[in-house]
Amino acid sequence: MPKRETATRVYSFGLWTVMNRGADPFGAATRAALDPLEAISGLAAHGAAAFELHAEDLIPPGSSTVERDRLIAEARRRMTDTGIVCDACGSSMFTEPVFKDGGMVSNEARVRRMALARYEAAIDVGHLLDAPLFNIWGGRDGAEVDASRSPVDALKRLRDGFNELDAYITRQRYPMRLSIEPKPNEPRGDLYISTAGHALGFIATLEHPEHVGVVLEFAHAAMAGLNPAHEVAHALYAGKLDGIHLNAQRPLRFDQDLRFGGANLKDSFFVVKLLEEERWPGPRTFDAHPYRTTDEEGIWGFVEGCIRAYEILAEKVRQFHEDAEVQQLLAEIKRWAAPPQSDERPATGPGRIFAYERLDHLVFEILMGTR
Ligand code: XUL
Ligand code: MN
């Protein structure tokens, strides 16, 4: 397959992806922790032009201001040396016991305050790394016990929280947008902002909806049993796709975060097709975990594998566009979309020209490399 130019496409990884130690709910870590600074340099050396982080990935909670500043200066040095940029920042407060019943939605006012302070501190870190986006995945903002809180009250708390964070960014004059990353469940039984539709509807209720967009993750859509390309389409249509997290996820399972290309061949193709056809300019970010069986060295193969999977699928998209039979079938479909010239009724019986069966099979052949 010919190598395609990558100049205009930025690949990005969450720092947490390569720092992941292979632990799961049933088993302890299987590899040593990668230092965050090494993660930045390693990603740059293996094809990433950008990275995303939780502030805590770089700066352990409880660090002094001096330590924070040292780590930021060191990260910036790595960024200057390699050319890699930071495209988004967030906070991993969801790991901490104090936020066990939520950050912004907690029933305890003091915890909600702490959550906002924690987000604001992380926004500062993002700004110091020149991140244009602060992405919030509220991993604990959900419930198992619906009797504990009205879901409407939870949404009002989220609204107040997002409005406050937006006001903070404006007050600080940071050139930064806010985004919401929806997910249906995990770690909570149910998260309040579950899908693209939930996020877009919620954003419309904020004081400044124009400051806030969405980051959509392939696996999160798949976990909800939705078509990931259709999810992405909703955000694109609304002009609100601020980020994409690519990975893989088999249905009816826990949040697997598999390497992009590790499952969902056809759905992955259609997500790549959509991003490429729409010329979406944002970074292609991977939010996946190397398998638990992968050792420290294997992590970089995982990184290259994610990028290569995207490149191959983008090449398949190009092949789809250049395939004469595919184009002829699409042209036929288009002809029927033209305004009718007569009052002839649409035929409904057999013989209808929509050759979807063939079109779908051609996609299969292209993906299999048999065409
Ligand atoms: C969790 C998830 C997070 C966010 C960042 O499923 O996707 O890693 O992307 O907090
Ligand atoms: Mn994600």
Image: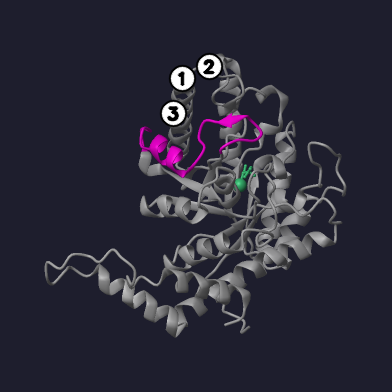
Mark 2–mark 1 CB contact (< 8 Å):
yes
Residues packed near mark 1 inside 10 Å, few (<14), some (14 to 19) or many (20 plus): few
Q: Position of residue 22 (x, y in %)?
A: 81, 47
**Residue visible at 68% across and 68% down in the picture:** 47
Left or right for 235, reference 136? left
Question: Pointer 1: what residue?
Answer: 153
Q: CA distance from mark 3 to mark 1?
A: 10 Å
Q: Position of residue 343 (x, y in %)?
A: 12, 66
Q: Nearer the viewer, mark 3 or mark 1?
A: 1
Label drawn at residue 251: none
Between disc 2 and disc 3, whose residue precedes?
A: 2
Residue 268 to residue 22: above or below: below
**Residue visible at 11% across and 70% down in the picture:** 342
Amino acid type for the residue under numbered disc 3: Arg
The N terminus appears in which quarter of the rendering?
bottom right
The reply to whether residue 110 is visible in this rendering is: yes
Amino acid type for the residue under numbered disc 2: Arg
The reply to whether residue 6 is visible in this rendering is: no
**What element does badge 2 sit on?**
loop
Label drawn at residue 159: 3
In this picture, which residue range is highlighted in magenta? 184-208
Asked whether 332 or 162 is in front, the reply is: 332
Amino acid type for the residue under numbered disc 1: Asp
- Tell me: is circle 2 under 8 Å from ligand 1: no
Q: Nearer the viewer, mark 2 or mark 3?
A: 2
**What element does badge 1 sit on?**
helix
The C terminus appears in which quarter of the rendering?
bottom right
